[in-house]
């Protein structure tokens, strides 16, 4: 899953835990959530959690918690604000939108070029077929004319033979 969505999930988990503590509905009264529970809830390991939380630490949206036998993370006011404003979801969707826009800006011209080439090839094929049809008609006419010429030549030779026989 995307790192920004994972950050949003972490903020959600920490924010819900913080709200439960403030409302007094939490089982324990510990501000933070230990790392083991976070690994389970986020379905990740130490390395992945480090990557997810690094930006959140930098923006002071979460903090390190080590009290009441709980070593983990807790949410800060900036983190609650980031979660409620869907900061990391918006970043994810903005990146996704930009990637789709980039993809479309590449694909549409390529598709247009392919359609143009296909249209040209179809037109060339159509012209070739018309030319072949005309050429075959012309060849047929030539054959007919050649046949007529042979017939006339044969008739002419027969007439000259008949004429020469009469004159003898």
Image (tube, rainbow, N blue to C red):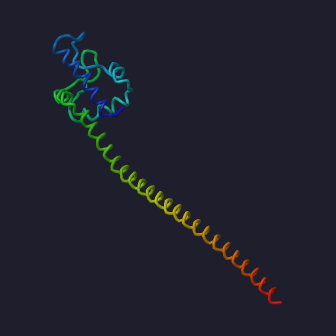
Tell me the quadrant of the picture where the N terminus can be found.
top left
- Furthest residue to the right? 168
Given residues 32 and 81, the one toward you in this image is 81
The spot of residue 36 in percent (x, y) is 35, 20
- Count up the numbered dots: 0
- State the residue in front, 101 or 40: 101
- Give the residue drawn at x 43%, y 54%: 114
**To which quarter of the image does residue 2 belong?**
top left
- Identified at 56% across, 64% down, the residue is 132
Which residue lies most toward the front here? Answer: 166
Residue at x 16% of width, y 13% of height: 23
* Above or below, comparing residue 139 to residue 36 in the picture: below
Residue 110 picture location, percent across and down: 40, 53
Q: Quadrant of residue 39?
A: top left
Q: Position of residue 103 (x, y in %)?
A: 35, 46
Q: Quadrant of residue 83?
A: top left
Give the quadrant of the C terminus. Answer: bottom right
x%, y% of residue 158? 76, 80
Residue drawn at (32%, 43%) of the image? 100
């Amino acid at each position: 899953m995307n790192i920004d969505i994972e950050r949003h999930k972490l903020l959600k988990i920490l924010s819900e835990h913080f709200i439960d503590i403030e409302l007094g509905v939490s089982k324990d009264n510990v501000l933070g959530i230990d790392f083991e529970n976070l690994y389970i809830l986020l379905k990740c390991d130490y390395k992945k959690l480090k990557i997810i939380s690094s930006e959140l630490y930098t923006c002071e949206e979460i903090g390190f918690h080590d009290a009441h036998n709980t070593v983990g993370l807790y949410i800060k006011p900036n983190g609650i604000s980031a979660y409620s404003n869907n900061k990391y979801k918006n970043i994810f969707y903005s990146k996704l939108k930009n990637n789709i826009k980039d993809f479309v800006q590449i694909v549409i011209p390529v598709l247009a070029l392919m359609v143009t080439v296909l249209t040209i090839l179809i037109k060339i094929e159509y012209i070739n077929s018309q030319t072949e049809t005309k050429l075959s008609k012309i060849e047929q006419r030539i054959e007919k004319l050649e046949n007529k010429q042979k017939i006339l030549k044969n008739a002419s030779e027969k007439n000259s033979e008949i004429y020469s026989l009469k004159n003898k």
